[in-house]
Image (cartoon, rainbow, N blue to C red):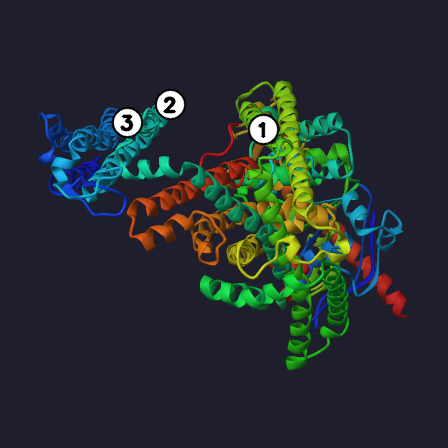
């Protein structure tokens, strides 16, 4: 094997940027700009230069023969670099901060001075990670044991987290900001997660349903795919604007009359569909298009009403369920956490257990855990909705606004997010179902499976990997889009980002952006794990098939 | 028993895929449907378990019109091995084989035993192959699983659409032999589709030759080879049909008693259940006039000679000529 080019690249990036670019900027307070510091300017001894040497060491190692040792060395260097790039400037920073007034000169208002990480530090981290990645690739190619690979992948990050928890990084501006606004951050993060979770749940129902319809009805599929494609092209700000007036109007309506309208439009849609079923087939050309359009529009009304009300209401209620200080809800939250940990633990144990009977009872226990989680979640949601509706005096005066629908705020945000989640979900459901080998469905038919059995036992499991890929796409995209919800006062992590932009405070922007990125990565990992559990090893794309 | 009575199938667009088909598959027998690609073999088969509706005519299964059953119920009673194998890739081999028993609501214990039994029957090792996925199997192994799955709930009737189509000739021969062995004990009523005439001759108790949706001839393999009804069938069975016919006769049926000189013959011995065709090939190929015959245990039990084989072929031809004369006479009487 040739030179490890990835590690060489990482090493050069890290070495050059640590040496030639400023690592930190010393700032007198949150807003004022500060003065940059290079590696060579750090007071003290040669320790800081060690960072530079460390960054260039992988160059030598990368020339070695490709084997486990090279992989382990590179990964070790990468991890060390990752940690020290954060740690050493922090140590130096403490010295700088202690004497901040002297550095910044007289006349500058010092309030809560801090160190802003600069380009050198960011690129240094990037280089360190590239070296680490090069080492990990060596380890994978050389077939290193799993434990070594895991340790190599997460060791440096673990050190960073431990150091952060022990207060080593308190000098950095993001950490300062975090300490000042921790409470607020938690609240905004929960809001952000709720946006994604509620939009994704409702989008999943709608999207899989529409994808199924597109798959079943060859005439409807181009219309459906086209419409959800169009939604995607509408800029989110425009979508908020479009939703503003109708949602405000809808909010004024009495809930009972809206329910009536829902039932009436459902009946209308059913009638239109029946009409299409009977005469639509016989119609030709334009007449058929008109009838199809009629069906689509009449079906869209109840779906839209339902989505709007359910999405807004679920968002309010789930937010309440996960943030309310009411003791009942707090207890339910603890119960949920316990059930979740138990279920995940049992599920992991199932995979390790080799004895058949033990595995089966563990699997049963895991199902109990999941069931308990579902039950506590439902109970929490019901409790929260009672709490939410407690303000309303009677059902007769209940307006749609009382259910959480409003022109600005979280309602339009969660509705827009639901709409944005549709394209990947519909498209992937449609593609997944359409690409199932017809011979396989045919043999299911030939063996006497009914249509629902065929769907549940053959089509769905075979389309699942593609559908799950759509879910992951949608969820990662939603984490990003949800940040814009702040412009209509909906909350979420976007609050920090927008506030940071307005105040030109990079610390504040980072306070919103870093958790958003972490959230996306975490969500992706959780969904991948779910996919591992749900998708049969017989059709998994990556990874070896099950042991024989 | 499966009976087709005047069955017609038109596809939308005016394709008549099956035209006035009359055919009876006797209980416990294998009937082979053969014909060129697109002649309507698969279509005829799929009419039986109602995967497609027929246009007119009637199909009875064990004496009952197949329209009397709910389609799902009918299909669970009829084993079906489709042309493209169509194993469920997300299920293990064991789960594939267990599909119909589970649909029928069998107890888990019984399903398990049945699956292991079937896998053994088709020559797979349950402990090794039960829990692997189809993609981990070779083409031949997949075909075996396809057959085991069709046998799943022990259906009295089987539809097999080119079940050994996708494998090399050697594996195919092995699979054919194994299925014949299985059939000897389970005696299913089988409708078997192929477009390989040698497979038809080997597997079929009867062979139905189809052409563009019509049944041209339905006869035992020997009759078909001896008396093709027209030029189409004659061309279809091939110019070597007399040799193929020898393939239906076993050496043990035409061999002579060994005499004292037999052990000294330097020809390689042939087994008594070898076909006469293969024995002839040995004699011609090696330039022998005679060769000894041994039984499965390797004991000498007879001798065959070129002259003896020639006499056997002549005898068969004479019998056929007299049969033909007799049938022509009958036909003439009928016209008179
Ligand atoms: N679903 C269908 N719609 C329209 N025509 C069809 C359909 N299925 C089959 N046909 C037509 O019916 C005729 C018979 O097809 P069939 O599949 O029965 O042939 P086959 O004898 O099984 O051929 P092969 O040996 O290639 O499998 C063909 O002309 C085919 O084009
Ligand atoms: Mg066919």
| Residue occupied by mark 1 | A334
Residue A111 vertical placement versus B193 (above, below):
above
Instruction: Identify the element where label 2 is drawn.
Output: helix
Q: Is residue B23 visible?
A: yes
Q: Which label number is shown at residue B326?
A: none
Residue sitting nearer the eye, B39 or A408 = A408
Is A398 placed left or right of B260 in the picture?
right
Q: Label 1 is found on which chain of the structure?
A: A
Residue sitting nearer the eye, A384 or B134 = A384
Q: Is residue B250 visible?
A: no
Residue A514 image-quadrant placement: top left
| Residue occupied by mark 3 | A168
Q: Position of residue A487 (x, y in %)?
A: 44, 58
Circle nearer the N terminus (3, 2): 2
Q: Which label number is shown at residue A147?
A: 2
For the residues labelled 1 and 2, the Cα–Cα distance comes to 32 Å
For the residues labelled 3 and 2, the Cα–Cα distance comes to 28 Å
Instruction: Identify the element where label 3 is drawn.
Output: loop
Question: In which quadrant is the N terminus of chain A drawn?
Answer: top left
Q: Position of residue B264 (x, y in %)?
A: 54, 24
Is B45 placed left or right of A503 in the picture?
right
């Amino acid at each position: 094997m040739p030179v490890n080019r990835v590690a060489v690249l990482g090493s050069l990036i890290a070495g050059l940027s640590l040496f030639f670019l400023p690592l930190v900027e010393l700032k007198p307070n949150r807003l004022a700009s500060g003065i940059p510091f290079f590696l060579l300017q750090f007071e003290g001894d040669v320790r800081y230069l060690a960072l530079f040497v460390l960054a260039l060491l992988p160059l030598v190692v990368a020339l070695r023969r490709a084997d486990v040792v090279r992989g382990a060395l590179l990964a070790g260097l990468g991890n060390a670099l990752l940690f020290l790039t954060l740690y050493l400037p922090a140590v130096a920073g403490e010295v700088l901060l202690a004497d901040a007034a002297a550095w910044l000169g007289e006349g500058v208002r010092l309030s809560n001075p801090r160190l802003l990480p600069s380009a050198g530090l960011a690129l240094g981290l990037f280089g360190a990670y590239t070296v680490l990645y090069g080492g990990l690739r060596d380890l994978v190619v050389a077939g290193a044991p799993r434990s070594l690979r895991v340790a190599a992948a997460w060791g440096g990050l673990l050190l960073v987290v431990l150091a952060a928890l022990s207060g080593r990084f308190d000098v950095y501006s993001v950490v300062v900001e975090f300490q000042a606004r921790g409470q607020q951050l938690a609240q905004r993060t929960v809001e952000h997660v709720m946006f994604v979770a509620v939009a994704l749940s409702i989008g999943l129902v709608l999207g899989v349903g529409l994808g199924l319809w597109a798959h079943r009805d060859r005439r409807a599929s181009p219309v459906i795919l086209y419409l959800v494609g169009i939604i995607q092209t509408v800029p989110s700000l425009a979508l908020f604007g479009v939703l503003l007036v109708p949602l405000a109007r809808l909010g004024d309506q009495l809930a009972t009359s809206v329910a009536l309208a829902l039932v009436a439009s459902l009946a209308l849609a059913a009638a239109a569909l029946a009409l299409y079923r009977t005469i639509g087939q016989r119609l030709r050309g334009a007449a058929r298009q008109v009838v199809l359009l009629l069906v689509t529009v009449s079906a869209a009304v109840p779906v839209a009403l339902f989505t709007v009300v359910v999405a807004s209401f679920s968002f309010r209620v789930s937010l309440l369920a996960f943030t309310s200080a009411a003791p009942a809800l707090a207890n339910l939250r603890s119960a949920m956490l316990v059930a979740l940990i138990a279920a995940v633990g049992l599920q992991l144990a199932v995979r390790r257990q080799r004895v058949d009977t033990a595995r089966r009872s563990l699997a049963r226990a895991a199902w109990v855990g999941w069931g308990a989680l579902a039950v506590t979640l439902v109970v929490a949601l019901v409790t929260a909705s009672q709490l939410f509706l407690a303000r309303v005096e009677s059902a007769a005066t209940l307006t749609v606004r009382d259910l959480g629908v409003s022109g600005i705020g979280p309602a339009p945000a969660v509705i827009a997010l639901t709409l944005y989640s549709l394209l990947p979900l519909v498209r992937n459901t449609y593609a997944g179902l359409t690409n199932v080998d017809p011979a396989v469905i045919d043999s299911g038919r030939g063996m006497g499976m009914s249509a629902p059995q065929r769907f549940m036992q053959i089509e769905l499991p075979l389309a699942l990997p593609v559908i799950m890929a759509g879910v992951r796409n949608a969820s990662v995209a939603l984490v990003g889009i949800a940040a814009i919800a702040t412009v209509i006062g909906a909350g979420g992590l976007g609050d920090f980002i927008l506030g940071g932009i307005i105040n030109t405070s990079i610390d504040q922007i980072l306070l919103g952006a870093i958790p958003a990125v972490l959230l996306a990565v975490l969500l992706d990992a959780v969904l991948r794990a779910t996919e591992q559990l749900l998708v049969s090893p017989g059709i998994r794309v990556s990874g070896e098939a099950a042991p024989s | 028993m499966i009976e087709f009575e005047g069955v017609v199938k038109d596809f939308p667009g005016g394709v008549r895929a099956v035209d006035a088909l009359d055919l009876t598959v006797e209980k416990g027998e294998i009937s082979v449907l053969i014909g060129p690609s697109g002649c309507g073999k698969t279509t005829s088969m799929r009419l039986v378990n109602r995967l497609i509706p027929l246009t007119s005519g009637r199909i009875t299964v064990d004496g009952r019109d197949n329209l009397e059953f709910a389609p799902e119920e009918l299909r669970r009673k009829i084993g079906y091995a489709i042309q493209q194998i169509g194993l469920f890739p997300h299920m293990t081999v064991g789960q594939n084989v267990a599909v119909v028993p589970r649909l029928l609501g069998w107890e888990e214990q019984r399903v398990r035993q049945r699956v292991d039994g079937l896998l053994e029957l088709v020559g797979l090792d349950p402990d090794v192959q039960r829990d692997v996925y189809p993609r981990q199997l070779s083409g031949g192994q997949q075909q075996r699983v396809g057959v085991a799955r069709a046998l799943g709930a022990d259906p009295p009737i089987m539809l097999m659409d080119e079940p050994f189509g996708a494998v090399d000739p050697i594996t195919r021969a092995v699979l054919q032999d194994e299925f014949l062995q299985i059939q000897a004990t389970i005696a299913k009523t089988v409708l078997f589709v192929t477009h390989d005439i040698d497979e038809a001759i080997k597997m079929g108790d009867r062979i139905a030759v189809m052409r563009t949706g019509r049944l041209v001839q339905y006869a035992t393999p020997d009759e078909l080879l001896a008396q093709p009804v027209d030029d189409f069938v004659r061309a279809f069975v091939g110019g070597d049909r007399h040799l193929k016919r020898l393939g239906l006769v076993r050496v043990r049926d035409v061999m002579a008693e060994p005499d004292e000189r037999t052990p000294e013959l330097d020809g390689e011995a042939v087994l008594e259940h070898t076909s006469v065709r293969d024995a002839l090939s040995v004699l011609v190929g090696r330039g022998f006039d005679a060769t000894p015959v041994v039984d499965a245990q390797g004991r000498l039990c007879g001798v065959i000679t070129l002259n003896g084989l020639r006499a056997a072929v002549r005898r068969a031809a004479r019998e056929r000529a007299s049969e033909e004369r007799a049938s022509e006479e009958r036909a003439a009487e009928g016209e008179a």
